[in-house]
Amino acid sequence: MLLVAAVLVLAGPALAQEGGEAYRDFPIVGSRVAIWVIAQLHLLFGAFVLAVPLFAVTIEYMGMRTGDQRYDDLAHEFTRLLTMAFSTTAIFGAMLLFMLLGLYPKFMSYLSSIFSATFLPYVLLFFGETFSLYIYYYGWGKLSPRVHLSIGVLLNVIGILVMMVANAWVTFMTSPAGIDDSGALVNVWDAIANPTWMPINIHRVIANVAFGGSIAGAYAAFNFLTAKTDEERAHYDWMGYIGNFVAIVALLPLPFAGYYLGREIYAFNQQMGITMMGGVFSWLFIVQAVLIGALFLAANYYLWLGMARIEGAERFRPAIKYLLILLTICLMIWATPHSMVASLEESRKMGGAHHPVLGFLGVMSAKNTAVNLMILTTYISFLLYRRGNRIATVAWARSGNIAQVAIFVGAAAVVIFLGVYGYYVEASVRIGFSVPQVGAVLFAMIAVTVIDAFLFKDCRETGGIRWGEISPRSQYALLLLAISFTWLMGLMGYVRSGLRQHWHVYGVVRDTSADAFTPTLGYATMVVSVTVLIFFAFLVFIFWLSRLSQKQAYRAQS
Amino acid sequence: MNVPLKIVLFTLAVTGFYTYVGAIVPQMEAHPPKSTEIGADMGPVELAATGKEIFFGKGTCALCHTIGGKGERCPDLEGIGRRAASRIEGVSAQEYLAQSMYQPNEYVVDGYQPTMPNISRAPIGLTDGEIIAVVAFLQNEGGEITVTPATRFEAAGEAGSQPVARTEGEGPLDALAIIKKYNCEACHDLAGAERRLGPPLHDIGARQTRAQILHSIVEPDAEIAAGEPPYTPGLMSATLMSTGFYDTLTLPELTALVEHLASLEGGE
Amino acid sequence: MPDKQNGRGLPVIAQVALVFAGAYLLLRFSVQPPIPSSVLGMYMFFVGVSLMLFVSSDDDRFAEFKRPLIQLLTAREHKVPRLVLGTVFPLLVAYLGYAGAHTEIAPPGQQRTVHPAPPNEIDFKGKRIDVLTAENPFRHLAEEEPEAFREHVARGKDVYYRNCVFCHGDNLEGDGLYAHGLSPIPANLADPGTIAQLQESYLFWRIAKGGPGLPVEGTPWDSAMPAWEKFLDEDEIWEVILFLYDFTDQHPRSWEE
């Protein structure tokens, strides 16, 4: 299978050049949707295949550090999913390549003329990834832990390199570089390191970690809900907690990485930036706000429900109410559109589509403030959860707590002050405010974590965590997290690709096919949903397969 | 209820909800801009109208040329249709106009510098048909439209634009002569901080090293100066390429130019 | 688990209903002019979801919340209310279905971009004007030659009261004589959310090209504003812009100092 892919990659250009046509048609759904769905599936599985080793190696390392066998087992369990998912990724990759060559021959021949130098390294890296993956999986418990861990790290490094090569192709389409006026190649490295390449690399690696964590959480949730014994429930409850933890930690910096990417797009081409934020795609970000809202609510909700299984956490229950109110208000602000849909009657009262009061909530100042406060709130939920069964015994416990509260209040005050002050200054100054806002939040999270680490160094525990005794509703929150993440990736993939509008390679190769127009958002979300459902169907199949292999091993043992 | 079934329903419900959200926001389709295709059946009036669109749009001609203005950077084109036939002996109006687009430096109006790039090539890249339309538009400015969609210009066949010829016996140019010959100041303000097509260079010596300056001349697109509105990547290299800057400049001349620029440090 | 709510004696389900209703009343009546129903609906959706999350974040509370509902649906003694519910609920659904299908004759809800992205440049009577950078040629007079500046403002005032006042009103509040015959109604230029958010060159574009010049995402023609380039010359437009800012005591937005 891999060989087929490799041969294809190398033979691709030759194949593509034979046909004289620019486009061929895919039956029923059309070429664009066909490529769209297959590429998205390939990306989702690719993300999964990249995320799981990141996740597994981290967990394995934690197991080595703490000496807790559970971590090692968890990492192993996940790697088992990998081998199957890996070949699925390759199948979709090969399908994508076949279809691109068949359906978009002219465009592909251009792309190969630019990137042919990267094809061989890609194939070699791909082999490297395959080999290290199999050594990593089959060497589990057989190699020395240190060697095994280093192979895991190697697997990740190669995996990320593979992704970076593929990212070069994709980002080149958005922000071509290294070519002359007629589109001919001048410098391959410039074409690879085009303006949006690094931002996408960073964004994707972080998002992959979050995605991997959320899929791990969903896997645990599924197993928890279908578990027959308390032991299994305890195991999967714990696994779900770890998955959620990883997902949330990676989720928090994601908006900042996205911001960086957005800035680079603006810098590369302002027209593209305006298309993204103010033009055809502006409503997409309202949909995104709903999804991010769902992610934040689900993550917090999971932590709150989780407190029920911690002895001693009851004392923090009353705080939930206030955290929830804060989250809801921030969410409402975040989802408030700048231009509203209003009936004739309503817009008359408002004096246009611009609402004199809510209009203030529709702009960047308000939204930055809201998202920063949401991040802080989620962090507080997490902090309370961690403290559930602990009581600090150090002498300075009281002043330490006061300091933490002061830091939170201070950070929130900075965020809100700058948010409000932003309305009174010029736009050019206001844009600069987002940096200190983010800085305050990051500082607060780091400082509070450090204080917390010392505060609870030798703490008294009021009770244990009763793993497995969590409400099933929490597991649905985990499932929601995974579905939302996957769906969000589909949506963001659409906007990244759609930004090019009627270009295959922005400003260089024009899309002259019948599908050159940008479809409506409703149509796009439909395609995204179908893709997500297909992905989950495949995922369930893989999970089922992995369970099957486990069962056989169990019988052989007994 | 059976748990796996519940999970499936939950998944469907969540995906369905997101699809619903996507469907209730306003729906817009964005269609690609109509490419100005020159139909074979276009009459002179239609051609001229299309040409006008190109002149002010894709062709970016109006960036430098005015129609009824002072013509600071490049000649004003009011009434060009009237003058075109008498510019060059034996060259018809339409052929002259075509030549000034395909080979802009072949004939340069008195008092102007050869700064115009060949607009049939990137980054502007007008097609032959589009150039016919622009010619029609220009002929319509005080003259009679003689081109049809079927017109084939002689100038189009000759490869690209001609470099600025090096005068016989001309010694190495000094920096000021180079600046004058290649009309750097059409795009760069060397005396003040005015933003033209390119960034002002009156204080370049204070901002950049000689190496950086040299790099910016030799490879103008490697780094585009920041600023709003953004400068156009590719414009400088295309212009310099078409004027033969890179083909004819000698190393001592280049060095002199860099030295001169490095000495510009703003101030009075 | 002892809970504060129990002490107050109000059943959880009633509390939820109260908070929901309270939030609705607050959002519906505290903000003037009223929040458009599309946005209000979204807000109430978030409130509803949050309430459900709150109720279900504690097992005891959730159980208490569900108890009356389950009782209503199962207990023997609630036969009559159940019967009532069994008839009222389908009727309600039927009514909603009917109301959804039977709409009043009214123009559909409008989606309109407040400040649509302008084109990079426009062709004003054959002259190219860069919408991103063009500056008001008279603006600099404000400090250099205040008297000449006042003169231009006065001329702008003249232009305004000859042409614009009929729709935009005596005080520039968008309530002129003809305003109520238009949809959408003319912009309230005295509102700090309108012209103060924009550059003068943007105003120039909107005045010169009017409704017909709007881009697709502004939905073309979704403005009754005429294309004033047919009636005013360039200087007049710049002057009237001076007047708009002067009269409302606002300043145009600038990107760089």
Image: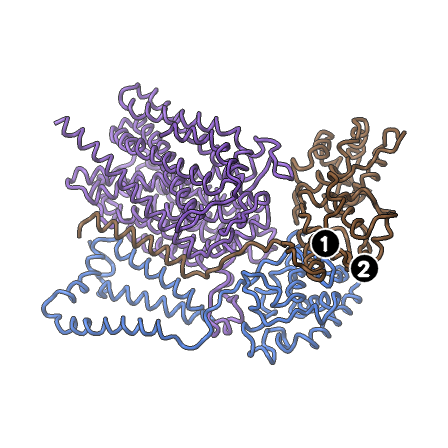
**Which residue is drawn at the image coordinates 67% and 45% (left, top)?**
B125
Q: Is residue A354 visible?
A: yes
Q: Position of residue A266 (x, y in %)?
A: 57, 47
Kindly identify which numbered label has been placed on residue B134: 1
Q: Which chain is blue?
A: C
Instruction: Tell me the chain of label 2.
Output: B
Indicate left or right for A431 with A12 as reference: right
| Count of number-bearing discs | 2
In the figure, what tint was chain B given? brown
* Mark positioned earlier in the residue sequence (1 or 2): 1
**Which residue is drawn at the image coordinates 56% and 76% (left, top)?**
C182
Q: Residue furthest right?
A: B169
Determine contact: label 1, label 2, CB under 8 Å.
Answer: no
**Which residue is drawn at the image coordinates 54% and 64% (left, top)?**
C219
Residue nearest the observer in this picture, B110 or C231: B110
Q: Give SS at disc 2.
A: loop
Kindly identify which numbered label has been placed on residue B143: 2
Q: Residues within 10 Å of mark 1 (few under 14, many from 20)?
A: many
Indicate left or right for A140 with A157 as reference: left
Image height check: is B180 above or below C209? above
